Amino acid sequence: MSADADSYEWPAFHEASHCCLAEYFSQETKEAWIARREGQHIPAEWRAPSNVADKQRRLNEIIVLMAGRAGVDRLSGRKLEYPDWHESDDYTLALRRAMWLSGDDEQAADLLLQWGARRAELLVERLWHEIHAVAYGLLEHERLTGSHVREIIKQSNNGKVAA
Ligand SMILES: [Zn+2]
């Protein structure tokens, strides 16, 4: 299947990547939806369980925020240019967390975002079967609840030995 920027496929894989990495880090998804050329992954709550340290939670959130872009890169088989990347919510929210973790030092924050992008790239590769399943769920239904997302992820792992 060819990737077409005007189709629903890119937003589906983008949002599915957010969903699967969020679940990987036990950050519950409330809802995910796609419409032509766009979509949104809505976390159940922005705060992770309180037993997760604030720093670790923000590091995980950076990886989850970087996952959408990593998922579309994986789908298209190359690193794509995103002219409006610095205006995106994903970048803005990730930068806010990176600045908090870096004592407001822009250079350190930028390195953290690079770290998050690499971690997202590797996890997208590892969770690709889940992302694929959730993306096709989104393409079929356009809107998935968090419990539906978790069910699809669970089914995609049936018969698979945990890595
Ligand atoms: Zn996104």
Image (cartoon, rainbow, N blue to C red):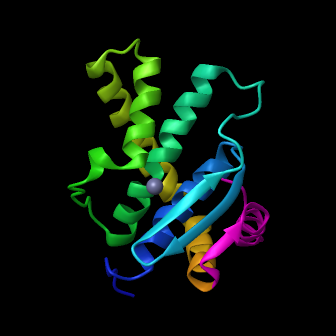
Q: Is residue 39 left or right of residue 92?
A: right
Identify which residue, 149 or 163, lies in the foreground.
Answer: 149
Q: Is residue 61 left or right of residue 25?
A: left
Asked where in the image residue 148 lies, by quadrant, the reply is bottom right
Q: Is residue 22 above or below residue 62?
A: below
The residue at the point 45 percent across, 38 percent down is: 93
Question: The N terminus is located in which quarter?
Answer: bottom left
How far across and how far down the image is residue 66, in percent?
43, 47
State the extent of the magenta-drawn residues as a range. 141-163
How far across and how far down the image is residue 37, in percent?
39, 73
How far across and how far down the image is residue 57, in percent?
61, 29
Q: Is residue 84 above or below residue 32?
A: above
The residue at the point 64 percent across, 82 percent down is: 141
Instruction: Give yes or no for residue 90 being in the magenta stretch.
Output: no
The residue at the point 62 percent across, 64 percent down is: 32
The residue at the point 56 percent across, 66 percent down is: 131
How far across and how far down the image is residue 91, in percent?
37, 43
Identify which residue, 155 or 10, lies in the foreground.
Answer: 10
Instruction: Give yes or no for residue 160 being in the magenta stretch.
Output: yes
- The answer to whether residue 127 of the structure is visible from this angle is no
Identify which residue, 33 or 58, lies in the foreground.
Answer: 33
